[in-house]
Image: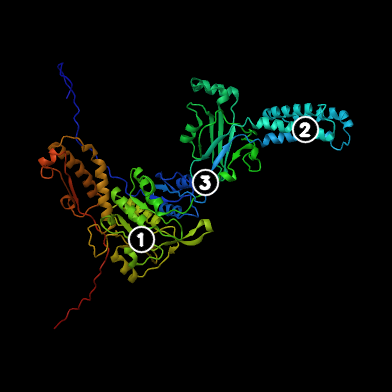
Amino acid sequence: MPASLTYPGVYVEEIPSGVRSITGVATSTTAFVGRTLKGTSDEPILINSFSDFQRTFGGLWAMSPLGYAVRDFYLNGGSQAIIVRLYHPPNDNKSHPKATITAYGIPDVIAGITKKIADAARGPIEGLKDISDLGTKASDINSKVDSAVAAETDPDHNVIAKNVGEKIKTAVGQPSVKTVGDARKAIDDAVTETNNILSKSINPLILEAANEGTWANNLRVRILYPEDTAAEGVIKSQGLDKFGVTKNDLFNLIVRNNDTGETETFQNLTVTDSPCRVNKVLENGSKLVRVKGDLPANRPTKHYADKLEKDKTIWDTNNPTTFSGVLDSDMASDGDSLDDKDYTDELGDGTKGIYSLNKADIFNLLCIPPDSFVSDTSPTVYQKAMKLCADRRAMLIVDAPNDFAGDKLNDLGLTGPDARNAALYFPRIIEGDPLRGGQLGAFAPCGAIAGVIARTDAARGVWKAPAGVDASVNGIMGLKVKLTDAENGALNPLGINCLRNFPVYGSIVWGARTLRGADQVADEYKYIPVRRMALYIEESLFRGLKWVVFEPNDESLWAQIRLNVGAFMHTLFRQGAFQGSTTQKAYFVKCDKETTTQDDINKGIVNIVVGFAPLKPAEFVVIKIQQMAGDIQV
């Protein structure tokens, strides 16, 4: 009501309606867990297309089936996916998880300049037999040195050239030079002294790849300095002078992946404590590198050949003086094969492996493809994943083992109430491998199945069984095993979903049972659409009723709950999600003094009972035909 009624007149008051819409959650966000070529490890990363997967995780990789499963997901209608990359460090003690780059101006360019000037100085004395002739060649030596110095037009090169030129001319003119050999030694000593002085001024910046894998072994880094005028302008405009930054502190960093051409440029960085400190900038802005260890005391030594835009060969491996690259001793490894502990984080704190998904807001389907093309996902991993899915109201898609037979179903150990949240599909699918010239191979079907489920959800709804003639599996050449009706009839009563190939229709999903779908179990969540519908309602209400917490627990609150939950359920009823021709037959929402007693109120509890009549798939179609007897006239 208005704060106070003081003057005669009309007061306007806004009264809350009590309507709080409950929005249905996503139904087909699919999580994939396994090895990828690159990407952050043990973090759930959301992607929206296979192009996203290629950019972030490297695309298809011959060492892991996960990329193929993601591709199948999108080929069959998938939309959002969550990728959890797993990485098992190498055990050979020779390679590293992450590539390391020691970034600084490589002194080879210095050696090249000094050698060029030394050769110019040696020219006039080559062929001389007697040092007595050396005096007549002094002017020639000085002239050759001066010409070589003048040839270095780059300002930085010219400084080095002048330095070594003066040292050579001084050294050759010393009284101690009495033979041609002495002259050559004097030149060599002058070159060595120059190189030593310049090399001691090298100041490196140690970088490492942003994440593990051989993808980073062809990274290249260049360090350049901004012009003084530009540096002073940046310091003034960004207020860096308040942090004690001077023009001699700023540098630019260019990072390039020579395999893909991906390039990142970071300007006006520092190693001092400021908003532009290099480790902060790379941590937040680079997909390629991070700072490793401590920062150097001063800005790193810059590279030469600054003409990046004009010289397209600047990153060429044959021209190493223009960049810093990964050395052989600092190369990374793609790691070893995964074991069960990598998936289940038995040696960690419960935040890695499949449990990385607890950091994701929501996922509805979980796929764990085998670690290799000749192995199977461990039953132990599936058991832990099934429990995770039960806790997160998601469904686990289980790939049947390579040598699977119906009598080996119990070997997987996927039983108990949590098996309602898992579904097994058999057999594997046959498709071409673009990394092997289109050669056909057998692949786990989980990604394709998840795509079919996502496509069915979008077209028909989560209450429609993702099976039947509309549930075609796209992008494949066939199935590893062609099942007959009799074989299908032996597997279906066990709760095993079969993939079949029929004329005209092609390869389709021909089963929609959970792992509690065996006829002998007689579970109420026998069918996938019934279980997924229940999970959908549970998650939607769980998220949509958080506003109820700490509200006054009385009839007014109960009425609002009935109103809002009833509106949500009625929307589903109108979409055809329930059995029954009327709302009374389709669903009910109960929240009153019968569900919430005074004792419950005293304990701070409000009880809401929601029931629904699920649609169950027509799994068996029986057609009865009989002959009609003709009329018999007597």
Residue matched to label 2 = 187
Label 2, secondary structure: give it. helix
Indicate the amino acid at tag 2: Ile
* Quarter of the figure that contains the C terminus: bottom left
Residue matched to label 3 = 96
Q: Position of residue 5 (x, y in %)?
A: 15, 19
Residue sitting farthest toward the bottom: 634
Where is 300 relative to 516, above or below? Answer: above
Indicate the amino acid at tag 3: His
Q: Earlier in the sequence, mark 2 or mark 3?
A: 3
Indicate the amino acid at tag 1: Tyr
Label 1, secondary structure: give it. strand
Q: Position of residue 408 (x, y in %)?
A: 34, 66
Q: Earlier in the sequence, mark 1 or mark 3?
A: 3
Residue matched to label 1 = 425
Residue at horizontal 52 percent and vertical 49 percent from the top: 93
Residue toward you, 116 or 239:
116
Q: Quadrant of residue 547?
A: top left
Q: Position of residue 340 (x, y in %)?
A: 39, 54
Residue toward you, 114 or 519:
114
Would residue 79 be found to the left or right of residue 173 on screen?
A: left
Q: Is residue 107 visible?
A: yes
Q: Find out whether the residues at labels 2 and 1 contact each other: C-beta distance under 8 Å.
A: no
Q: Earlier in the sequence, mark 2 or mark 1?
A: 2
Q: Find out whether the residues at labels 1 and 3 contact each other: C-beta distance under 8 Å.
A: no
Residue at horizontal 21 percent and vertical 38 percent from the top: 548
Would residue 104 be found to the left or right of residue 620 on screen?
A: right
Residue at horizontal 20 percent and vertical 28 percent from the top: 14
- Structural distance between the alpha carbons of marks 2 and 1: 78 Å
Would residue 249 be found to the left or right of residue 529 on screen?
A: right
- Structural distance between the alpha carbons of marks 1 and 3: 38 Å
